Amino acid sequence: MRSRGFARSAHTMSDTEAVLDDLFAVIEQRKADLPEGSYTASLFTHEKGENAVLEKLGEETTELILAAKDGDDEELVHEGADIVYHLLVLLSMHDLDVEDLRAELAERR
């Protein structure tokens, strides 16, 4: 049994698009402004560079796999969101954006 309601009808496609677009806009703003104390800004200035984000993606992927294996749907969604966030940061590091991701996904339909 799921501990949270994951009703698909609760969000429209435009709501989902807006969330990703808004999150990406924040990431881009933090990349440009590098505000002190911002986790996102710290990823862009980390001494390991891109490797810091790649390590986080690996860590979050492992946590996602374990959540799925354990049947923990709430944790699965949480870790999935962490992966999406770090993926968006990685896209930004490569001067790509959400639209590039959407275009690739659209080609796979």
Image (tube, rainbow, N blue to C red):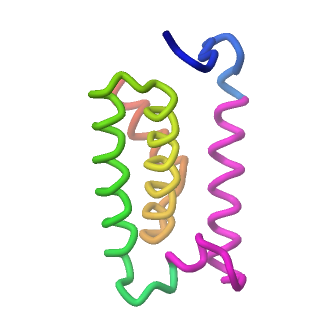
- At which x and y percent is residue 34? 66, 83
- Residue 65 is drawn in which quadrant? top left
Please state the extent of the stretch shown in magenta in the rendering. 15-43
- At which x and y percent is residue 36? 70, 85
* Residue 44 among those drawn in magenta: no
State whether residue 17 is above or below residue 36.
Answer: above
How many marks do you count on the picture?
0
Residue closest to the eye, 40 or 74: 74
Would residue 75 appear left or right of 61 to someone viewing this image? right
Residue closest to the eye, 18 or 85: 85
- At which x and y percent is residue 100? 47, 49
* Residue 17 among those drawn in magenta: yes
Residue drawn 55% across the image and 79% down it = 42
Would residue 78 appear left or right of 48 to someone viewing this image? right
**Majority SS type along the magenta span:** helix
Would residue 102 appear left or right of 66 to someone viewing this image? right
Residue drawn 33% across the image and 28% down it = 68
Q: Quadrant of the C terminus?
A: top left
State whether residue 89 is above or below residue 82.
Answer: below
- Residue 103 is drawn in which quadrant? top left
Residue closest to the eye, 100 or 31: 31
- At which x and y percent is residue 53? 39, 68
Residue drawn 52% across the image and 39% down it = 78
Residue drawn 42% across the image and 26% down it = 72
